[in-house]
Image: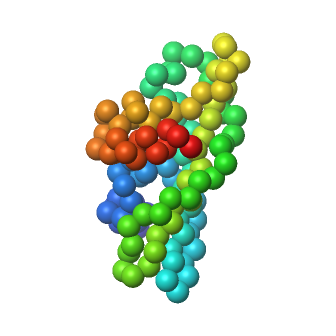
Amino acid sequence: MQDSYSELIKLLLPEIIVEYFELTSYKKGDEVLHIYLKEINSIPKEYRPYKLSSKGFFDEITVQDFPIRGHQVYLHITRRRWLNEDTGKVVFRDWNLVADGTRVTQEFASFLKEI
């Protein structure tokens, strides 16, 4: 049954969201749907040679998405950050690099990069 939900989510959300985020919860009101997503703990390709440890998340951002069946849709996105133990710097996924390898629009990648 879980696989059928995964397939349904792939139809409703942008591909990039399905690939890099997990659905943590949702709230449905009379005319609004709130979908809560958290970035998975998957080290970005460009940082795989380094020793990274997960150091929590950035503040949640809210993005309005396309309406579904008359409901306004808001994606509540929480992005992950890692500590590069070699340099002591906080690193995070570079959405411009992700955009090159997927079908996400450059505009969406730029939006995520800015936050």
Give percent across and percent down for residue 2: 43, 63
Task: Say whether residue 36 is visible.
Answer: yes
Q: Nearer the viewer, residue 6 or 14?
A: 14
Q: Nearer the viewer, residue 34 or 7?
A: 34
Give percent across and percent down for residue 72: 46, 74
Q: From what the image shows, is residue 2 above or below residue 89?
A: below
Q: Nearer the viewer, residue 69 or 62?
A: 62
Q: Residue at x 40, y 47 (%)?
A: 108
Q: Quadrant of the C terminus?
A: top right
Q: Quadrant of residue 36?
A: bottom right
State the residue lying farthest toward the bottom. 30
State the residue lying farthest toward the top. 86
In the image, taking residue 1 as reference, residue 28 lies left or right, namely: right
Give percent across and percent down for residue 10: 35, 59
Q: Residue at x 56, y 58 (%)?
A: 62
Q: Residue at x 35, y 51 (%)?
A: 15
Q: Residue at x 51, y 33 (%)?
A: 93
In the image, taking residue 49 as reference, residue 108 lies left or right, namely: left
Task: Say whether residue 40 is visible.
Answer: no
Q: Quadrant of the N terminus?
A: bottom left
In the image, taking residue 101 as reference, residue 88 lies left or right, namely: right
Give percent across and percent down for residue 111: 46, 45
